Image (spheres, helix red, strand yellow):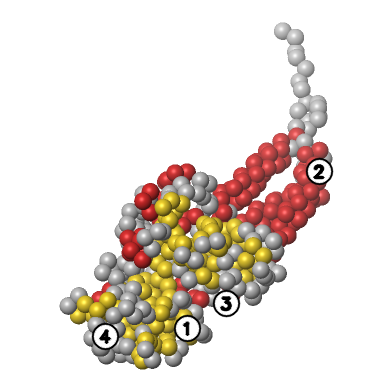
Amino acid sequence: MANLPVRDESEHTGPTPALQQPVTPRLAKTLVGFVCLLLGLIGLEAARVYFIMPFPGSQLDDTANLDRVKITYWLHQYGSWLRGAGIVVILVLAYQLLFKSNRIGYRWLIGSSAIAYGAVLYMVNSKMMADQMFRQPIHKLIVPLEQNKIPLNKLVLGYAANGKATAYPLQLIGYHHQVRDTVGGMPIMVTYCTVCRTGRVFSPLVRGQADEFRLVGMDHFNAMFEDSRTGSWWRQATGEAIVGPMRGEILPGLTAQQMTLGEWAVSHPNTRVLQADSTFADEFAAMKNYDKGLSKGKLTRRDSASWKPKSWVIGVQQGVVAKAYDWNLLQEKRVINDVVGGEPLVLMMAPDSASFGVWDRRTGGRSLNFRYANRRLTDLETQSVWTWRGHCIAGPLAGQQLGSIPKAYQEFWHSWQSFHPQTKRYNLKH
């Protein structure tokens, strides 16, 4: 048998496989730059939502939170430019990795990176933005009371002007966060933040010009809206622009009342009622128990004990003076007499234990003191009988109507405290 030649394994018989090519220092720097820039672009997208959405640690109730909002606002204003510049640079780096090296691993890295970044862009801009998560009505239907399908025991935010009235169920506006309407010939912006339990109605006029608003996120757990003309961001609880060209401006607030639809209809039998848009049936179903404080969500639940972050309070503002009243105490006492900012007022609970009113208790040049006993609400001075709406129905003062206190709201204690840091708390010893 002939001897076969022995192959010398030390001989190089072809080009080095791509995976065996050495990584030069320059190529290593390009790789590091690519990875770092990719992480930076992902971080940019994350930062655009982190500080204005309820992620862990993003809504801490401190003064630094406004600074974080300012940073996020800047990112929203210039983020597209930063993203564009970053993408151009990363494409250049990708070109160098792909065409100056035959390493298969780089191809996998660049391909998977493109998929990952695309997924982040999609999630942030299509799923995690506030106006994509909470959308305004597509088929807005507001009907007369006789055509209404909303149960009468549901809480509503009611607004009346020029002899016209409309009720907006919390279950609906709590999801939408904003509903635009016209009542009595006046354009209005009906807003609600479920995390703060704040219902507010504003005139959508910015320096006398009507504007459009979109939900952009939150600050101190309170909804923020962005106007279309200047791009400024406005707090829902106060109507104040906190960043942008309109900073310091305040939307004109309009007086609204929160009560059950049944109680609202007694005072406003001609009311219209916002109906559920079937497009959002699942979202409304998730809000079914919010009215009664039975929501299971960490941010929307109720603390049944008093003076906890998620306890219900009635906040009253008279001028620069603010005061909070425990909802549990009002349910127990049914009436609370007090003075806020030098103005005598009275809080009254309706028989349904869900509706309330706050009234100026002065009439006929004197201040009245009210008490609830034997299921009757009377004043001590004349023994006249009153309803929780501040209307006298029997006695020497029959026919008298107490004036309403416009800035009186039911909300979570943490919210009232955040936006009224100098607020006082009512107690029986006061």
**Secondary structure beneath label 3:** loop
Assess whether mark 1 and mark 3 are in contact (beta carbons under 8 angstroms): no
Callout 3: few (<14), some (14-19), or many (20+) C-alpha neighbours within 10 Å? few
Q: Secondary structure at mark 2?
A: helix
Q: Residue at x 76, y 22 (%)?
A: 7
Residue beneath disc 4 = 396
Q: Measuring from the top left, give residue 76's x and y in whole percent.
A: 68, 60
Decide which of tag 1 and tag 2 comes sooner along the chain: 2
Q: Nearer the viewer, residue 291 or 66?
A: 291
The reply to whether discs 4 and 3 touch (Cβ–Cβ < 8 Å) is no
User: Where 54 falls versus 239 (above or below)?
Assistant: above
Q: CA distance from mark 4 to mark 1?
A: 29 Å
Which amino acid does the dot numbered 4 rest on? Pro
The one of 64 and 372 positioned closer to us in this rendering = 372
* Spatial CA span between label 2 and label 3: 46 Å
Location of mark 2 (residue): 96
To which quarter of the image does residue 390 belong?
bottom left
Pointer 2 or 3: first along the chain:
3
Q: State which quarter of the image contains the N terminus.
A: top right
Q: CA distance from mark 3 to mark 1?
A: 24 Å
Front residue of 356 and 292 = 356
Q: Amino acid at mark 1?
A: Gln
Compared across the picture, whether 393 is left or right of 119 comes to left
Q: Quadrant of residue 427?
A: bottom left
Question: Does residue 224 sit above or below 34 in this rendering?
Answer: below
Look at 69% across and 61% down and name the residue there.
229
**Is tag 3's residue or tag 1's residue first in the polypeptide sequence?**
3
Residue at the spot of label 3: 63
Q: Distance from label 2 to label 4 (Cα)?
A: 92 Å
One can see residue 29 in this view: no
Question: Which x, y percent locates residue 358?
Answer: 38, 77
